[in-house]
Image (cartoon, rainbow, N blue to C red):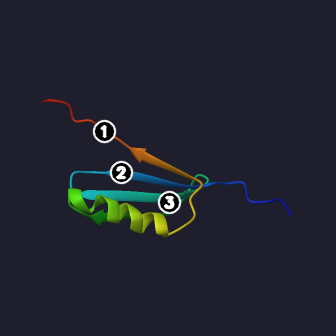
Amino acid sequence: MVPDRDPFILVLNAGSSTLKHAGYHGMHCMSQGTSECGEADYPSAIGRVLRDASWNAIAFRVVHGGNE
């Protein structure tokens, strides 16, 4: 039997009031969702997502709005 080599990857996208997340197994999106949260609630929202599965890698999207 050949072991499953496709990683489980979690992708996070933190907005000003939401945390969006998607879970991938290889190239296939297995789950996605949005958590409404204030700035102080981000750690607990991320904790809930992390507990959902065993992830091999985590990607975090960061966008800087700049001064304008």
Which residue does the numbered mark 2 point to in the structure image? 13
Q: Residue at x 45, y 58 (%)?
A: 22
Q: Which residue is mark 3?
A: 23
Q: CA distance from mark 2 to mark 1?
A: 9 Å
The first of marks 1 and 3 along the sequence is 3
Q: Amino acid at mark 1?
A: Val
User: Which quadrant holds the N terminus?
Assistant: bottom right
- Percent from the top left, x then y, of residue 46? 38, 61
Q: CA distance from mark 1 to mark 3?
A: 20 Å
Q: Amino acid at mark 2?
A: Asn
Location of the C terminus (image quadrant): top left
Count residues near mark 3 (Cα–Cα under 10 Å), then give few for <14, some for 14-19, many for 20+.
many
| Pointer 1 residue | 63
In the image, residue 16 lies at what x, y percent?
21, 51
Residue sitting farthest toward the top? 67
Q: Residue furthest right?
A: 1
Residue plotted at (43% across, 65% down): 49
Q: Residue at x 61, y 53 (%)?
A: 26
Label 3's element? strand
